[in-house]
Image: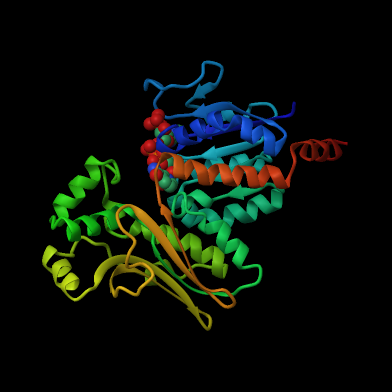
């Protein structure tokens, strides 16, 4: 049977999730792809950490080892920050490998260029997992854009800040207490700065802007406000009026200019994001034909994020069966 060879960059929450998803869904993947999926190698940073990885898989701290694997087809990237992810993905694309990334910080900045480069090289790039975790927002937007014009997006794109606002309201916790609870439950990072100051939601909004409008606003012109200054008293007051604070990233295009903000907004009970609670993410899309659609689901986490990456993977290899790729290489090599 044909084998699709994959490598994982990173074996943290997301990388391990992709590993588990491939191992546990092997029969299903074989059925729909007509090929065996083999994880050939995993790139990590700390070779001393103990990990549950099959003994026949190459575990390395050297990216060159990954690039040198014969007949490698695809790379899943789940490491943190702009670098070295950006450099690795460029190198992978240049070697003719498909790439699938969850790295929003890197992709918000370099996504446009990586898409351009992957088109030049005739490979695919999947980035569903960069935005709203397991919610299939990228695929939905791509589908809608075939006939619709999208005019506006409003989203709760950071589960940690939504969880904090929810707990402050429901359990009357202070901001610090709610943040501590989010950390205890493993929702917030050890360093939660980008969750609570709006930067995480901003990166996702910029990825959506690129996808919808083919461009991003000037980053310096986007108002980014986090949730750190919201007090328990403010939350109580809005609740007494039947309203709620939601941390909303929104973008619209009027004429030629894109307007984007990331900030806490007080919404009424008839707002589509009013009832989104806890770590959930949700995105409302306003489009020319379909009207308004709201998607809701887990915005992060091991398996939801892995699910988004595996969806990309299946999409790539269903559209481009592996035997055709091989033929293409033979033709190119003549
Ligand atoms: N966690 C989520 O729910 C979620 C959801 C959507 C998107 N994402 C994105 O997915 C990516 C991964 O997130 P995560 O939560 O899985 O992070 P994580 O748990 O911190 O894991 C990061 C992994 O990357 C490896 N790594 C870091 N720097 C590296 C380097 N320079 N070279 C090689 N390996 C390196 C680490 O290696 P060691 O194990 O050796 O330290 C670790 O295995 C991030 O970009 C994040 O923004 C995460």
Residue sticking out furthest to the bottom: 255
Where does residue 10 sit, x and y in percent of width and height? 46, 34
Q: Is residue 260 above or below residue 65?
A: below
Question: Which of these two is toward me, 137 or 239?
Answer: 239
Name of the residue lying farthest toward the top: 55
Task: Give the quarter of the figure containing the N terminus.
Answer: top right
The image quarter in which residue 282 lies: bottom left
Residue ranking furthest to the right? 334
| Number of disc labels | 0
Residue 81 makes an appearance in the image: no
* Quadrant hosting ligand 1: top left
Residue drawn where x is 52% and y is 54% of the image: 136
247 vs 195: above or below: below
Residue at position x 51%, y 40% from top? 77
The reply to whether residue 243 is in sight is yes
Q: Name the residue nearer the viewer: 10 or 163.
A: 163
Q: Position of residue 173 (x, y in %)?
A: 13, 55
The image shows residue 230 at horizontal and vertical percentages of 18, 65
- Between 272 and 4, the residue placed more toward the observer is 272
Which colour style is shown?
rainbow
Query: Residue at left 15%, top 69%?
Result: 234
Image coordinates of residue 15 in percent, x first then y, are 47, 35
Determine whether, in the image, residue 194 is placed left or right of residue 320.
Answer: left
At x 51%, y 43%, the residue is: 307
Q: Is residue 43 left or right of residue 113?
A: left
Q: Is residue 231 left or right of residue 2?
A: left
The C terminus is located in which quarter? Answer: top right
């Amino acid at each position: 049977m044909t084998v699709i060879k994959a490598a994982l960059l990173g074996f943290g929450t997301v990388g391990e999730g992709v590993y588990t998803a491939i191992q546990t869904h092997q029969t299903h993947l074989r059925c729909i792809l007509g090929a065996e999926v083999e994880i050939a190698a995993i790139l990590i940073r700390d070779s001393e950490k103990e990990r549950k990885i099959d003994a026949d898989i190459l575990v390395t701290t050297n990216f060159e080892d990954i690039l040198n694997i014969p007949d490698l087809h695809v790379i899943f990237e789940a490491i943190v920050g702009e670098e070295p992810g950006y450099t690795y993905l460029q190198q992978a694309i240049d070697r003719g490998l498909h790439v699938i990334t969850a790295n929003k910080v890197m992709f918000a900045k370099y996504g446009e260029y990586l898409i351009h480069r992957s088109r030049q090289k005739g490979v695919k790039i999947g980035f569903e997992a960069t935005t709203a975790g397991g919610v299939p927002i990228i695929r939905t937007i791509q589908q809608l854009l075939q006939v619709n014009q999208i005019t506006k997006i409003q989203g709760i794109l950071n589960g940690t800040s939504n969880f904090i606002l929810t707990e402050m309201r429901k359990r009357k916790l202070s901001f610090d207490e709610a943040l501590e609870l989010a950390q205890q439950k493993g929702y917030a990072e050890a360093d939660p700065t980008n969750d609570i100051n709006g930067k995480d939601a901003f990166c996702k909004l910029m990825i959506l802007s690129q996808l919808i409008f083919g461009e991003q606003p000037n980053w310096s012109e986007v108002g980014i406000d986090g949730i750190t200054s919201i007090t328990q008293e403010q939350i109580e007051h809005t609740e007494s009026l039947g309203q709620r604070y939601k941390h909303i990233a929104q973008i619209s295009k009027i004429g030629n200019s894109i307007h984007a903000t990331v900030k806490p907004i007080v919404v009424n009970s008839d707002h589509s994001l009013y009832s989104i609670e806890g770590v959930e993410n949700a995105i409302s899309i306003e489009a020319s034909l379909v009207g308004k659609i709201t998607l809701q689901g887990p915005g992060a986490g091991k398996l939801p994020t892995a699910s988004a990456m595996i969806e990309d993977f299946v999409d790539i290899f269903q559209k481009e069966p592996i035997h055709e790729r091989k033929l293409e290489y033979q033709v190119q090599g003549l």
